[in-house]
Amino acid sequence: MTVFTEETRERAREIIARYPADRSRSALLPLLHLVQSEEGYVSPAGVEFCADVLGLNKAQVGAVATFYTMYKRKPTGDYLVSVCTNTMCNVLGGQEVYDTLAEHLGVGHDETTADGKITLEHAECLAACDYGPVMTVNYDFFDGVDPQGALGVVEELRAGGRPMPTRGARLCTLKEMAVQLAGFADEREGAVADGGPGEATLRGLRLAEQHGIAVPGFDPNTPIRSKAEADQAAAKAKAAEAAKPEPAKAANGARPTTGTAGNAGTGEPAPAAAVTGSTAPDVKAPDGKSPQVRTAETRQPDARTAVPDAPGTKVPAETTPPAPRDAQKAAAAGAAANPPAGDGKPAGDEAGAQERNLKEAEAQK
């Protein structure tokens, strides 16, 4: 087992301390990033380390480590180069970028160059369609790349340089990035001051400024309330609601008058807009329908089921459920039409075939 450094163990204790004592398992994700920051991937030793400090078994840790693609299960290069080949980026040339890099580097998906510098992968989506085609290096973006531009980036990386991403802070190695993903600050001087947002990201803000659009009453200097303050405000609002007087009942037992000028004195409830500020019409909850009708309304149309949008058809109406004896007859008819399977073994399970396979295996030893 790899002996992790004392610094890593101290950081592991710090990560676990961020969570309530009875919720320490929540620390598993940052802990996996932490062990990856030391070894460059989540090794069996890293899985055992996480299981040991959290009191879990290795199967529980391995299930999480194999679920998320950011946890690498084999040694990874200093720079993880990911090229988006999903629909939008692919149409704009993403696949050509990936193919060019694969041919130039001599590696395929999830493979690392011989010098240990670059691991190449194609990504299904990097969530930057408005900048496509995009490529990331250790999760920092290079927008609007073309094959030659991508080659320039990887060659600079292999030469020891660190090209500036289109957006975000300056590049760091995968191990350095894993430390940050574990929840620790980037300690390089001026690192977080580099980069900036892209113009497409700021487009909505630019339009709001141009047209004078702002959130009513928004004060950016308003502090975020603590949980105690939020709970106190909620309790106060609940007490104020409980203190409101109950509406008086009409002498003849009719519904109380809660209307406005349009329905005052009629006994009708106030419209939704008067109560909640909403102008949406009242709609009966779907739970008011029988399961059969709900199913008929939502299933795909076929030759036997009427659906709301099929011409000349209508949804089955609410009907009286069948009597027990009718259900018993239907069940009996179904059982008769579907006899249980026999106990005979399927083809290939005969004892003779098994003995023959065993003899052939022994003869080949």
Image (tube, grey):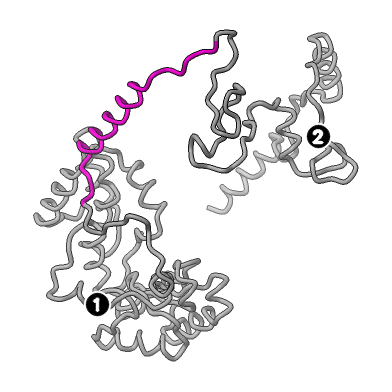
Q: In the shown orientation, is residue 1 left or right of residue 197?
A: left
Give the residue pinned by disc 2: 315
Element under label 2?
loop
Residue 228 within the magenta-colored segment of the rendering? yes
Element under label 1?
loop
> How many callouts does the rendering have?
2
Give the residue pinned by disc 1: 170
Q: In the shown orientation, is residue 235 left or right of residue 213?
A: left
Residue toward you, 49 or 280: 280
Q: In the shown orientation, is residue 290 left or right of residue 171?
A: right
Say which quarter of the image contains residue 40. Answer: bottom left
**How far across and how far down the image is residue 125, in percent?**
48, 66
Residue 249 within the magenta-colored segment of the rendering? yes
Q: Residue at x 33, y 74 (%)?
A: 197
**Residue 308 in view in this figure:** yes
Q: What range of the chain is rendered magenta? A: 223-250
* Chain-order first, disc 2 or disc 1: 1
Q: Alpha-carbon distance for marks 2 and 1? A: 61 Å
Badge 1, how many Cα within 10 Å: few under 14, some, many 20+? some
Name the residue type under label 2.
Answer: Val
